[in-house]
Amino acid sequence: MRDLFAGRRGLVAAGLLVAEFAAATQALVIATIMPRIAADLRGVGLYGVTIGALVVASAFGMAFAGPLADRFGTRRVLASAFVCVACGLLCSALARSMPQLAAARAIEGVGGGLDYAASFAAIAKHFEEGRRARIFAWLSAMWVLPALVGPSLGAAIASTIGWRFAFAAFLPLIALAALLVLPSLGELGETVREDADSLAALRLLVSRATLAMRGERHAAFVAFGLLQAAFFGADAYVTLNLTALRGATLALAGLCVTLGALGWSAASALQPALLERFGTRVLVIAGALCELAACAGMIAIALRVPLAWAFPAWAIAGAGIGLAYPTLTLAALAGADPGSEGAISSATLLAGTIGMALGVLLCGVPIAYAAHAHGMLEPAMIATFTIAAAAALVLLPVAATRLRRAGDQRSTTAS
């Protein structure tokens, strides 16, 4: 552990972890208190718009962060990211209406997208492949404490000192992350390409090579999208399955989601050692099988098996993505040419974002149809988790035929 946090690279790693912890805690706290915020600002009708503004803006920032990091350096991009996030948080704390809050969240979303992709680029540019897995494991670990205390902390803040503090309170953490990361990146230096294409990530992702899964990197893009479609497509409806169909309380349903987050973090902690022993292919296949098992568990819950089955099922789902998420990220970044790491990082994260969005939308179709047609929720919920399971099922042959075996040291195809 000491070598990971030693010297200037260690300060960069520590700063990225602080930023990830701030993002994780804020996401869970704000998600908990958004109904109170919407009620206070008298803007329940814009509830979805406010959430959507953050997501869309984040994807926009993510698409361009990596190529900009290749052209101007990760230090400049991360500095811009920290400024945008801080401005968004401050404006959110001062918002007097839901449209103002939506605009503030959009500013923060751009910063968050820049930060996420540029952080991945910084890891790829400044840490050798052997240490990247350990850093990604630490990044996942930053979600453990927020997953445990975030919802209750949000409720406590909203009911005592007020929801505005939930935004402003994270400004010191953003400042700390900037102080740790930016000076250190300035001293480390990195390869930049003045001719780097600002659309490089989009061209890389939307290419014939990706559609044909030509080479491990492009196969990793596709697999990453399928993985996130399977996990998040199901995760979005776990609480609905437990509460609306089985009558569980929100607290009980929240515990199930928390176990998923803990499973993710625990598996991520084990992933570096497992990757070294078993290789990319085995870990991604294991992750896909975990998602299949978890979706089968949720289908069983809809079919009225004992409710207690939900908790191990969703812990298994978290373990599955905890194994496969960092593994596929590392597979995409492996063998990247100096000066192209940023574009590859953005393309990888965009693939996951697209998969997540499609998964949530497609898995929601049966539920939306049942609500519109006044149909039964049980068959709709079964169909929802079947769709998520289908994404995991498609991931299996992709992993089995396109990803590396244990001990296979060939590099990914240059893009």
Image (tube, rainbow, N blue to C red):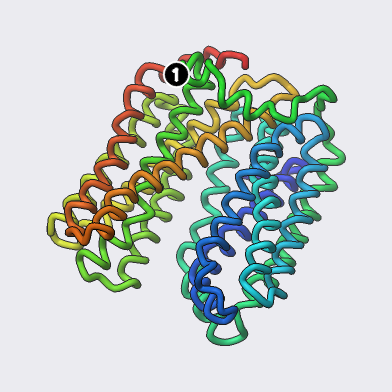
Q: Residue at x 61, y 23 (%)?
A: 204
Instruction: Name the kind of residue labelled 1 in the image.
Output: Arg
Residue 16 or residue 44, whichever sits in front: 44
Relative to residue 87, is residue 298 drawn left or right? left
Is residue 18 among what the camera can see?
A: no
Picture coordinates of residue 305, whole percent (x, y) = 12, 57
Picture coordinates of residue 236, whole percent (x, y) = 38, 54
Counting the numbered discs, the total is 1
Is residue 264 among what the camera can see?
A: yes
Which picture quadrant has residue 193? top right
Q: Residue at x 78, y 52 (%)?
A: 180
Q: Residue at x 40, y 40 (%)?
A: 229
Farthest residue in the bottom direction? 160
Relative to residue 216, is residue 107 drawn left or right? right
Q: Which residue, given by chain and number where applicable, does mark 1 sit on?
A: 404
Q: Quadrant of the N terminus?
A: top right
Picture coordinates of residue 272, whole percent (x, y) = 49, 35
